[in-house]
Image (cartoon, rainbow, N blue to C red):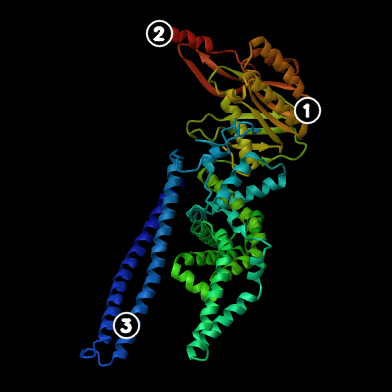
Amino acid sequence: MDRKEIYTAIIGELESGKSVLKRKSGVYLFFKLLSFVAAVTFTVLAFDSGNAICIKATMCIAAAAFSFAVYLALCVVDGRCRKGIAGLDRKIKVCERENAYLDGDFSMFGDGREYIDPGHEYSFDLDIFGPSSLFNRINRTVTREGSDRLAVKLRTLPEDKERIKGLQDAVEELASMNGWRVGYMSSERICADLERLSLIEGSDNWRCRFACSATPLIMISLTVAVFLAALSGFVSWYWFSGLFLLNFVFSVLFSKTILSAGMNVEKIHKEYSGYVELLKVIEAADFRTDDLIKIKNTLFGEDASSLAAFKELSGILNLFDQRGSAVIYFLLNGTILFDIVLARKFLAWNRRYLSHMSIWLESIAELDALVSFGTYAFNNPANVRAEIQDVGSDTIIEAKGIFHPFLNREKAVPNDFVLPVRNIAIVTGANMAGKSTFLRTIGISYVLAANGVPVCAEKFSFSVVSLFSSMRTTDNLSRDISYFNAELLRLGQLVRHVRSHGYTLIILDEILKGTNSKDKLEGSFIFLHEISKYNVSALIATHDLELARLGEEQSGLYSNYRFEIGLSDEITYTYKIEKGTAQNLNASYLLANMLKTI
């Protein structure tokens, strides 16, 4: 079934459910108004002894209390109903965003521009981050940590076959759980600031030791006892007043600790309430694959459950909000040492749960990133699961019908390609013939495959290796680095990489573009001779047809590929990769035609 039809059908179901809830909310609103009016009416009647409608004031008071109880119950039920409507609205928005994605609009998804790193091994060259990037197309994370984890996954590839298989199984399962994923992605965006939680954690000062001791409980018990005794007339109110002021002074001494712990508490409380809702969605999932089961078991362990911890933390943070009123602050601290009790609860929570927090957040972040991969896999059902080759395979990449994932599937020209072990493929061709796009196709497909994500191809098999590319070198005037010098630095980084890593797949678009043709050719020979000493396979695009003679002279180490064009009245582009060296180039042809039209 077409993916747009699926999302549109879901939107229809959600709209129907929303209409039902709106009608219920309307009924609740009517009866809320009715019960409130009844409560007010019976209250008035209770104090109107001469009214014949009400024989006894007590009956009116009871009726008023009952009406008000009904009103409160309807408020709770209507609140849940409105919450349900808001949840359905968020799910509808998720489906609408996915339909926009299928139409080629990625503007509502984070593009990861904050992760752009020109010095990274491959991410800058392959458009992994930034506007219209791979991250922009994949990202469906709902937490800040999930976004960071997704970025790490795209720029730090696993080098373990079993780990990749586990990722493939997890992505495949999540892709099949479309309804659950829509619910997950409808969660409100969470940008938690955990640093604030640790502001009083582990503080070994007298305030924290005092709060955790039995003294506050003794003081509270004594204050309550004296209050009751004064109320009964056994002792003077001066005793209670003295204890009240003493309690308040102790609470004021704790104000610095409480203020630091409650910094921006409204924001934190909202975010951790969001985590509670998100964890409920995760807890309801029935995962079957090992990676997802492990995540769920980590989050909901018997010894410490993240959901219970987040609920408790949300409750504690909610208590911080109650300190806003000066009257409440004065009365509660004078009677029950509210601030000290709050600090005590916060410290107790920290001791019990804070050590688990980083593990829980890592698990949520991992699932968050995997949900993004699963959604991408669902939205691209024609993509195939990559095959992972065994150690000792004679090929690094074997692709059939592969094309770049950014291209329209109906217009893309698929290609077949095999890159053997210890082989350097030299790709020649005219400008705009498809060389650079093909290089990026292989690179970005490898990134997807290593993350367990289906690839845009009929078949894609790969060996687990490290990846390094050099396709988009730029100068840096602020550092006084010329284009040529930047190229040298990048090639030096490449050589250091292959020396310090295991087997490496290298993708290069031109070598030494920043120098003259003869120097460039000689430098290219030197560079290729150097990297051929190491465990590498390489895919190198070049305009230097002379470089292709390496494939003729050393066919065991080098191989020649080309993107050919047709020259007639108009240039025709096939965008198909073939064996051999390009024969037709187009720069002079295009320039001559341009000059004719001026």
What residue is disc 2 on? 598
Q: Residue at x 63, y 40 (%)?
A: 449
Task: Indicate whether 197 appears above or below 418.
Answer: below
The answer to whether 233 appears left or right of 160 in the picture is left
Q: Disc 2 residue type?
A: Ile
Query: From this viewpoint, is residue 414 visible?
Result: yes
- Determine the secondary structure under disc 2: loop
**Crowdedness near tag 3: few (<14), some (14–19) or many (≥20) residues, C-alpha within 10 Å:** many
**Above-or-below relation of 576 to 87:** above
Mark toward the start of the polypeptide (2 vs 1): 1
* Label number found at residue 64: 3
Element under disc 3: helix
| Front-most of residues 12 and 200 | 200
User: Given the image, on which type of amino acid does mark 1 rest?
Assistant: Tyr
Quadrant (top left/top right/bottom left/bottom right) for the C terminus = top left
- Looking at the image, residue 191 sits to the left or right of residue 288; the answer is left
Q: Quadrant of residue 50?
A: bottom left
